Image: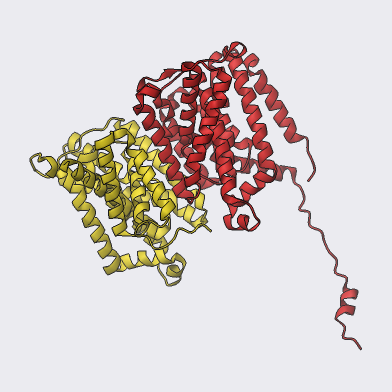
Chain colours: A yellow, B red
Amino acid sequence: MLLVIISGLALGGLYGMTALVYNVMYSTSKVLSFGTGQFAMVGGICTAWLVLDLHWPLWLGFVACLASGAAFGWLSEVIAVRRIVAASDEHLWVLSTLALSTMVQEAMSIWWGTDPTPFPRVLPQEFAGAFDQKFWLPLVLAVAMAVGLEQFYRRSMTGKLFIAMSEDAFAARARGVSTDRMRSLSYVLAGILGAMSGFAGGQLTFADFALGTALGLSGFIALAVGGIGSSVGALVGGAILGMLTSLTTHYFGAQYQKTIAIGLLILLLVVRPQGLFGTTRVRQV
Amino acid sequence: MKHSLVRPGIVAVFTVFAALLPYITGNLYYLHVATVIGVYWVLIATLNLLVGFTGQLSVGHVGLLAIGAYAFCLLAGGQGWNPFIALLAGGGVCAVIGLLLGLPSLRLPGFYFAMATLAFGLIVSELAQAEQWLTNGSVGMPAPSFPAPFDTPWGFYWLVFGIAAFITWMTANLARFMWGRAMVALRDSTVAASSVAIPIYWTKLIVFVFSGFTAGVAGGLYATSQSYITPDAFIVNLGIYFFVAIVIGGRGVIIGPFIGAAVLAAIPELVGPLAKYGTFFYGFILLVVVLVLPGGFGELINTLVEKLRRTPQSSTHIEPDLEQLRTAIRPRA
């Protein structure tokens, strides 16, 4: 039972981190990218390839993992978001990020193969059951990431500019904020954080090309449950979803995971459309 | 607007060509590809109403296709129903499931709806793997074929062709008249549409249920065309293909998505090496079209036709009646 709870929390940490990544991109561009989960996928596969196949030292693999995330984040802003946001049509960013996400996933499945492969051990720890690093690593990192992001938003100038843009991008632009550069920066940051979550969760999920879509969906559910824009909400939403997934798997079997998850999403959105910790209502005008 | 005979002419020529295709090509494989395109079109035609006209981005119609296919196989194969009744029943099942899916999810804004339908597609393929007592798991199940005149490849092609033509006619009628106007209006501005008394939610729901029904019918036809179905046949990538066909064809055009569907399905089938990169290629095309040509090729062709036809801008030149104006503003003595 302890193992069920711990693995639920670990999954929740992973989902929560994905939700945080959604938040970072949403704050500057109001885009919910379909490719959010792919950052973790690319980061995870990149590390597994460099460390296990090419025998790079782990720290170098980690750096490369973050670099791949940063590059991918920047590219996705340049390719799929910049022009679309300029044209400001709501449907189009859904399509462009879906297209990019599909391309990356397919390219990975062709290059890396469709079977999940093992991920290197991060810390020299003996396998320790419920207290193994593969469970606590994503959980700790998720909390650290949420705290770090909150500090970043509150203390640093760049973070404050992100907040300003999420309140009103036009007003921020009028006050001399280079909104385009900030948006690029937020995507680079999102890519780095996403790749980091893929690194932390790698031992739990393995290096799997299909991770991106699954994580993108689960992270989005965590985000919607917690409320868009809230870091606490992202963590709580992730934890709820992770626990639910883990308990469902334990009691009913793995095949009902997604059914339960989507049931949670729809139920919550009908009852409380702005999510548990969300403040602004989703307006469709 | 002048009624021209060009468009009906093109449609007529194309219809005759499609009807006579089995005589033109003796190659059974090409005929199979054409049949599959027809089957996809049965689904895409009404999905176009939902995506292109109403603007609801449903990624999960492949789930409905799968349910239709399994329902058809279970009813016609297992229970021994008449295949035509089973086909309609499969459509009915999908319409009901579409209703149940649409009731909550159509209230959600764009991206939420897309995610909910994506999740639906994933759930269906998960359950098709897991519920072995019903679907035989990953082993799959054979699909029954249709009775006598339709049991040959040619006969089945004509059956699909007939159904596809009927569906096309129905969607064209829906799109051209009041319903289509309502759909386009609520796609372009929900607030404006509701201010002129268009029932937003009901319009979306009815279009969704209708597209669910034809997705179920397409599922039954798909099962027969493949003659054996497994959960692997209904991966979410197929849903992406439907989507791309509509977007490159042009949103809000009837015939554009047909060309998109035909070209996209034919290229990987006819150019062997591309088959492996099929989904990557679809993603690439989707990205390019969205970035370069957001209206799709349908809009491009429309623009080109307008340019070629060179209809002069009908601006009426009005000579101001200066004398009357002067009288009007002259101060009364």
Name the foreground residue: B21 vs A107. B21
Position of residue B101 measured from the top left corner of the image (x, y, whole percent): 47, 40
Q: Quadrant of residue B256?
A: top right
Q: Residue lying furthest bottom in this view? A: B333
Name the foreground residue: B117 vs B87. B87
Position of residue B34 measured from the top left corner of the image (x, y, whole percent): 57, 22
Q: Residue at x 46, y 32 (%)?
A: B238
Judge from the rendering whether residue A119 lies leftward or rightward of residue B233; answer left or right: left
Q: Residue at x 20, y 50 (%)?
A: A139
Judge from the rendering whether residue B5 lies leftward or rightward of residue A40; answer left or right: right
Examine the rendered structure and indicate whether residue B246 appears above or below residue A32. Answer: above
Whether residue A47 appears in this view of the structure is yes
Examine the rendered structure and indicate whether residue A89 appears above or below residue A134. Answer: below
Name the foreground residue: B91 vs A235. B91
Whether residue B251 appears in this view of the structure is no
Judge from the rendering whether residue B126 lies leftward or rightward of residue B62; answer left or right: left
Examine the rendered structure and indicate whether residue A8 appears above or below residue B22. Answer: below
Position of the C terminus of chain B by quadrant: bottom right
Q: Residue at x 41, y 47 (%)?
A: A266
Position of residue B22 measured from the top left corner of the image (x, y, whole percent): 62, 16
Position of residue A253 measured from the top left corner of the image (x, y, whole percent): 28, 33
Please state the total of marks drawn on the protein image: 0
Name the foreground residue: A113 vs A261. A261
Examine the rendered structure and indicate whether residue A253 appears above or below residue B332. Answer: above
